[in-house]
Amino acid sequence: MKQKRPLFLILALVAVIGAIWSFMILSAARNATLDQRVQDVASQLKCPICQGESVADSPSQLAQQMRGVIRQQLQSGRSDQQVIQYFVDRYGQQIVWSPPWQGFMLLAWLVPIALLLGGVGMIIIVMRDWHAAPRVETNDDDADLAGIDENELQHYRGQIEKELAESDPIFTPRRMEAH
Amino acid sequence: MYFSDVGTIALILALGFAVYTVVIAVLGAKRGITALVASAKRSSLTVTFFLLVAASALVVSFLIHDFGVSYVRQESNLAMPWYFILSAFYGGQEGSLLYWALMLSIFSAIFIFTSRRVPQALVPYVVATLMSIEVFFLIILAIVSNPFVRLPVAPPDGQGLNPLLMDPGMLVHPPMLLMGYMSFSVPFAFAVAAMITGKLNSDWLRSIRRWMLAAWSIQTTGLLLGAWWAYHVLGWGGYWGWDPVENAALLPWLTATAFLHSTMVQERRGMLKVWNLALVIASFALSIFGTFEVRSGIISSVHSFAYSAVGPYFLTFLAIIVVFSIGLFLYRLPTLRSEQEFDSVISREGAFLFNNLLLVGVAFATFWGTIFPILSEAVRRQTMTVGPPFYDHVNGPLFVLLLLAMGVGPLLAWRRTSTSVLWRNLVVPAVAAAACAIVLPLLGVSNVWANIAFAVCSFTVTAIIYEFWRGMRVRHDHGESYFLAFNMLIVRYRRRYGGYLVHLGLVLLAVGVIGSNFFQVERDAVLKPGQTLNVAGYQLTYLGNIAYATPGVDAVTAQLQIWQDGRLLRYIYPGRQFYRNFENQPTSQISISTFGLTDVYVFLADWQGAASATIRVFINPLTSLVWLGGLLMLVGGIICWWPERRSRLRMPAKETYAKGTALANKGHGDRSVEAGVGQRREGTLVASCLGDRDPAWEAGNARVGVTERNDLASYGQDTGASEEPTL
C-alpha cells in the first residue's frame, strides 16, 4: 500500500489538472471578445501585398483596411468562417494562411498526421521485434559469478573502487577501512 | 592583373586539387597505400590554402572598391562603412557560395589535424566525401556563379547592399547560418565513410557525435541570431514566422537534435544503427535543400534577396546525394544488426524513440508545409499558402509533448524502469504542474492552451532542477558545498548535466514563445504631438518627428515617451531610414525597451511632416526569455561538446572490465554499487572501453543498466551514503 501512494497522488494531481483544463475549454468559447475574434480571423489571412506577413501583423494600409472590414462583418453577426470565405471569394485560396479541411488541400493536414500515426505503429512493431529477438544472455547474475574465484572477486572489487575514485573523488571508499 | 584574377586562378587551382584529393584518397584507401592517403590529406590542405587566397582576393577587391568586379559593384558602394563592406562578402549569392566552400575547406583542415583520434580506415573516405562536396561548390563557383567576373568598364561607384541587410545582424547571422548548413557535411562524410568501410563502431560514434554536436551548436546560434535579427528589423513584433527559409534552417536542426538523442541508444545499447545513419544523411540532405530553397527562389519568402540560375544545379546535387546515400545504405543494411534486444517500453530507450518520433514528426510536418504549395501548384494548378496557423496547429502540440518527454525521459533508466520508483520521482514535478495549472487562471490567464503549455513547462523545469538537486545533495553529503557540488556535477558528467542545461534553456525559450504568442498586445494609432496611447499599462506620449541625414542615408524618427504608473520610464525614437539607391525600400529602426521580462516594441509605420505619426505598439511579455533560454542552450551545448581531459581516456586492463562488470551486476539488488558504476560510465568507463569492443564487456555493459535509477541521485537517496558495503 505504501508503495502505491505516489501513484495515487499523481493520479489525483492529473485529475485536478484535467478538471481545470476542461473547465477552461468549456468556458473559453463563450467569452471571446470582438477584438480577439478580429485578431483571430486576421491572423488566418495572408496580407496580399506583403512578403510573408498576415493581415494581423502587417502594418500596410491594405491590411489595416482589411482589419476594418473583418471588424465590420463580425459586428454584423457573420461567423469567422463566413468572413474568411468572403475574402477567399475575392482574393482566391492563397489568401488563407492554412489550407482548408477539404479536397486536395486536406492532404496538407492528413499526410503529417498519418505519418505520425504510422511512426507510432512502426515503433510498436520494432519494439515487439526487438523484444521477440532471442536472448543472448541470461539475467542470472549469480551464474555469471559462479566461475570466479573469491580472491579474484575481491581483486576486481578493489579495482572498480579504485577506478571509480580516480574518476570522481566522491567515490573514494571512506568506509573501506571497516572491512 | 587584378586581385580578382588572382581569385579566379585560386578557385581553379582549388578545384584541381579537390578533384585530385577525391581520386587519390579513394585509391589510397582501396589499395591500402598510406602514402597516397597522406598525399590526399596534404592536397586537401592545399585546397584550404587556395580558398583562403580566393577569399582574400575578394576581400581586398571589396576594400579597394574595385567596382570593375561585377559582384563588388553589386554589393557595395563608396558610402558603406568598412564593416558592412566586409559583410557584403556573403551578401550575395556568389560570395555566400564562396564562403560556404571556404568554411567547408577549413572544417576539412580541422578534421585532418584532429584525425589521429579517428579510426584510420575512415579517414580517407571522410576526406574524399568532404572534397567531393567541395568539388561541387567549386564547379558552381568557377562556372555558374563566379564572384570574380569583371565588367568591361568599371563604374565609378557600386550599387550597395540591400538596406535590409545593413544591420548589425548582418555581421553575425548569415555567416553563422551558412556555417551551420555547411557543418552538417562532416557528420555526413563520417556516415558515408562508415557505410563504405562497414566500420560503424563506437569510435566512429564518438567522433561523429562531437562533430554533430558542433554542427548543432552552430546551427542553434544561427537560428537564434536569425530570430533576433527578424525581431529587431522586420517590425511585426515577432521573431519567428514559419517562413519557408526559416523552416529550411530549422529542418536539419531538428534531425540533428533527433540524432544526438538516438545516438545515445546506439552508444549504450548498440541499437538504432540504421536509424542514426538515416538521420545523419537526412540532416545533410536537408541542409542542401535549405541552400537550394533560398537560392532558387521557388518559394516566396522574406529572404528573397538573391535568386538565380544555380537552383537546378543544387537540385541535381541533392538528387545525387540522396540516390548515392540510399544506394550505400541498402548495400550496408544486412550488416547493421542491433546488438541488443529491447526490454521495456518504459525505459530510457523507449523515451528516446518517442523523442525521435516527435522531432522527426515536427521536421516532416514542417517540410511538408514548406513544399505543399509547390505540390498543389504542380498537381492541381491551385496557388495556395501554408502559413503560421498550419504550423501552430500541427507542430504546437508536438512541441508540448516534446517538452513533457524532456521532463519524464531523464527519470527513466536504461532497459527498464520500476514503475513504483518512476511514480515516486514524478510526484514533485507533477505537484509543480498542478500548482501552475491552478495558480495561472487565478492570475487571469484564461487561455487554456497557454495554461496547458505553461503547466508542462513547469513540470519539466521542476524535473530538471530536481535532478540537479538530487545530484548536488549526494555530493553535499560527501562534504562538498552545494556550489562546488553543482560545478562538480557539470565538470564530471558533462554530457549528462550539459544536456540538462540545454533542456532547461529550451524550456525557458518555450516559456518565452508561449508568452509572446498568447499574450502579445498590439495597438495601432495615428498620433498628434501631445497625444497619449495607452497599451497594457504603458502610456506612450508622442512628441513629434525629427528628420536627419547622414551620408548615403536619410532618416526620420518619431520621439515618444514611455510612462508607467505616472513615472517617465524613458524616451524612445522609432524611425525609418532611406538608403541611397534603395529609396523605395525604407528600413525600420524599431525601438525595443525591455522592462523586466516584458518588451515594449514600437514601430513607426507612417508619418506626415513633423507632427503626425502612425505607430504600432506591441507589448511582448516574456520575450526576453527566448534569448536567455537560447543562450543557456548554447552554453549547455558547448559543455556537452567540450573535450574530456586526455588523461581520462586511458585504456585499462580489458579483462578487469569483463569480469568487473559482471561483478557489478552481482550488486544489482544493491543500488549503491550500480549507481556508482552506472554514473561512472558517463566518464572514463565509456571513454576507455568503447574504444575496445570486448564482447564480454559489452554484455556486462548492457547489464549494468539493469537498475531502477542508475545514477548518482538514487545512489544517495535510496541507500544513504553510508551503506556502501558490498564492495
Image (cartoon, helix red, strand yellow):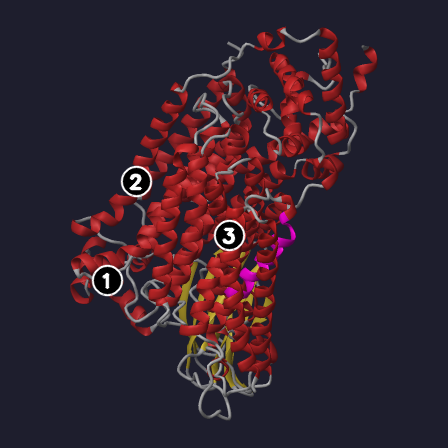
Using the image, tell me which numbered label, if any, was put on residue A94: 1
* Res B241 visible: no
**Is B141 rendered above or below residue B121?**
below
Q: What residue type is labelled 2?
A: Leu
Tell me the magenta residue range: B100-115
Residue indicated by mark 2: A115
**Is B104 rendered above or below residue B85?**
above
Residue indicated by mark 3: B27
Q: Residue at x 50, y 52 (%)?
A: B26
Q: In the image, is residue B463 part of the stretch drawn in magenta?
A: no
Tell me the CA gap for discs 3 and 1: 54 Å
Quadrant in the picture for the C terminus of chain A: top right
Which badge, 1 or 2, comes first in the chain's sequence? 1
Q: Which amino acid does label 3 sit on?
A: Leu
The mark closer to the camera, 2 or 3, is: 3
Left or right, B406 with respect to A175, comes to: left
